[in-house]
Amino acid sequence: MNEAIPVSRVTDHGTAKLMPDVDRERAWLLTVDGAPQSYVDLDEPAHLEFEYTRRLGHVLDTVAEPGRPLDVLHLGGGAFTLPRYVAATRPGSRQDVVEADRGLLDLVAEHLPLPPGAGVTPHGADARAWLEAAPADSADVLVADVFGGSRVPAYLASVGYVREAARVLRSDGVYVANLADGAPFGFLRSQLAGFALFFEELALIAEPGVLRGRRFGNAVLVAAHRPLDTAALARRTAADAFPARVEHGPALREFTGDARPVRDEEAVPSPEPPAGAFGIG
């Protein structure tokens, strides 16, 4: 790209726009139908601009010793922010990125190409279908960041989906997802109840104002069969510009309360965010 000029294209699932950041020379914001989806700095792939992305990055940093290559499956591609992050911080990792919007994949490949040898393989496919066809015990980490507009699709919010995620992860693997909800947290609590059926360890990362029900926002769900380094996660998230809290153990069980897991036939998308909740500003 010679000039940093905005790019707009109608893709399979909406209107995607790439907008240059005036403050960072080769940094770009991706929006789809006006909702911010990704931020990428081509010169600094380890720079994570969005707060929820930083929290996902903290989980990726703490799942294994620094620099160790991982096999990572990403459901939801966007502009490949996290795959670029893993390639930069854990060279030699093998990553699969599943993105249903093939037009978006083409746009990103054309304007924000991955560096040679990044070890990232894109797949234009439905996330649930691809997961169900994936081999068992094949991923160290599964990252889910799939939104239809500003909502997590229903078919990625059921017990059947959680079962498939647990099958694809290795015994010491870690699941991490970007979710969104607000009080009374019917969606988030049902997700926690569903993951508790298949994973022994759960954690939730969110800003205190979101957890207290004061506003709608992102929450990062982490699940594993082994103890999570919640102390390291808490230190990292507390040091961010917008500090977050890590809930786990009894406090998280209390938050989940009497919520029930959601079967496939009764699954619903995450709630519609209030106007302006995820706008650019």
Image (tube, rainbow, N blue to C red):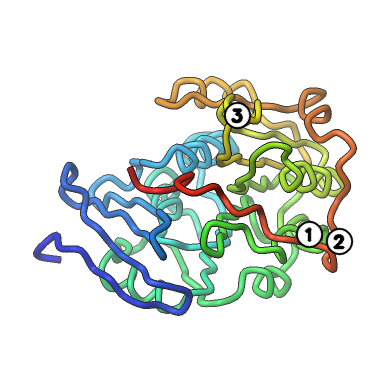
Residue extending furthest front?
A: 275
- Rounded to the nearest angstrom, the CA distance separating label 3 from label 2 is 29 Å
The residue carrying mark 2 is 263
Placement of 221 over or under 169, stated as above or below? above
At label 1, the amino acid type is Ser
- Residue 258 locus on image (x, y percent): 90, 37
Q: Name the residue under label 3.
A: 214
Give the quarter of the figure containing the C terminus: top left
**SS for dot 3:** loop
Front of the two marks 1 and 3: 3
In this rendering, is residue 220 above or below 9? above
- Tell me residue 208's x, y (percent): 59, 24
**Front residue of this view, candidates 175 and 266:** 266
Query: Regarding mark 2 in the picture, which secondary structure is present there?
Result: loop
Q: Earlier in the sequence, mark 1 or mark 2?
A: 1
Return the residue at label 1. 158
> Which residue is most to the left?
2
Circles 1 and 3, Cβ within 8 Å, touching? The answer is no
